[in-house]
Amino acid sequence: MKIMLKIMVMLLISAVTLSVQASPEKDLEVFHKYFKQKFPDVETAEFANGVYAFDMAGRENWEAIEEFPPYEPYIDDGQVMWETPFKNGKTYMDCFPDGPVIAHKYPYWDKKRKMVITLPLALNECRKAHGEKPLKYKKGDINKIMSYLAFQARGKTVNVIIPKDDPDAMAAYEEGKKFYFTRRGQLNFACAHCHFQNAGLKIRSEMLSSALGHTTHWPVYRSKWGTVGTLHRRFTGCNKQVRAKPFKAQGREYRNLEYFLTHMSNGMIMNGPGARK
Amino acid sequence: MTIKQIFILILVCLGLCANTFVIASTDKSQAEAAIAAAEKARKKAGSVSGEWRDTAKLIKKAKGALKEGNYEKAMQLAKKAEHEGKMGYEQALAQQKLRLPAYLNY
């Protein structure tokens, strides 16, 4: 009887979900360990290729597509955008003196403004500062300049820093993490249900990608969209797919989500823009 | 069949048909009240970031049906939207605390 009781208690403890506030470094360690156990034959660096790290049939098609990538025209157009002066004669280089190799520096925590700054947000702030109309954050020209900048940063290493001495930065990271593991929508799914728990399995005909490496290859030419789209466009789509009302692109929720999600890919090589189904 | 049995049978039939009679007699004010309740539930869900994708659409359709004079349809859509609003609110409250899945070994 005592043994049965002990077994039941142990089962109960293991079934109960955890509520811990681990450090971002500990999170990284735990997440990497989880995916390594789930996909023992996949090298960590390969996760930057998304679902094609383990969807071998899909990978063959993807590699063929990469011979003549559909995002190439967007890179070319993006370069024109980058190099074309604003009406006031200034260029993006006046806002980004290190440009155009800058995409790997985003997102980052702005201590003074107490917010996560993403590259699309920074680009639009540059445009506004020079009297230009901001670009829309999901569709359109933002994807051209983002494709160019992603391509320029290819080969750079993801390195999102969560400053230890700034509790607001930690709060933003934790908010992103909470978002990721929170059930939402009529279908009651959290991001983690697809991209942790069921990564590698199929939803209808498509294999689910893992959270690890998710952000390295954006923006992405999605065959479904017939064009390049931003990461926040995908966040919107995913939220709609679980029948939740999506949040505003480049609003606080999605920027913090990007902060958390990109940190998870720390150490991986940036390889955007990408091509996906 | 006796008169008593017939009487009981009629009562049972009326009871089964009660809902039908209620829906069929939905008037404009009832439909408007249902839409208002749905909108209130939608906003409440939104206040905790728990609004579902289709709730606003359902309310819009209910308003369209109301405008067309189809009060029954307006009521049904509004009730569905109200339910979604309530569920979204409950869901968001239930998800307020971060719970990491047990398969992550901390």
Image (cartoon, rainbow, N blue to C red):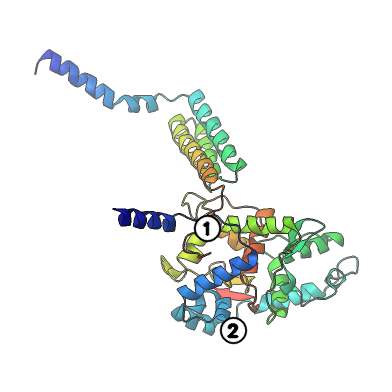
Residue A16 position by quadrant = bottom left
Whole-percent x, y for residue B59 in the image: 53, 38
Whole-percent x, y for residue A151 in the image: 69, 79
The chain letter under disc 1 is B
Q: Residue at x 46, y 52 (%)?
A: A187
Query: Residue B100: which numbered mark, if any?
Result: 1
In the displayed structure image, the side of residue B96 where residue A9 appears, left or right: left
Q: Secondary structure at mark 2?
A: loop
Residue type at numbered disc 1: Leu
Q: Residue at x 52, y 72 (%)?
A: A33
The chain letter under disc 2 is A
View extreme (front): residue:
A2
Q: Secondary structure at mark 1?
A: loop
Whole-percent x, y for residue A272 in the image: 65, 76
Measured in 3D between alpha carbons, the distance from the residue under mark 2 to the one under mark 1, in whole angstroms, is: 41 Å
Whole-percent x, y for residue A77 in the image: 72, 75
In the displayed structure image, the side of residue A217 where residue A168 appears, left or right: right
In the displayed structure image, the side of residue A201 where residue A113 appears, left or right: right
Mark 2 Cα-neighbour bin, 10 Å: few <14, some 14–19, many ≥20: few
Q: Residue at x 83, y 73 (%)?
A: A84
| Viewer-side residue, A143 vs A155 | A155
Foreground label between 2 and 1? 1
Query: Residue A68: which numbered mark, if any?
Result: 2
Mark 1 Cα-neighbour bin, 10 Å: few <14, some 14–19, many ≥20: many
| Viewer-side residue, A153 vs A126 | A153
View extreme (top): residue:
B3
Q: Can see residue A168?
A: yes
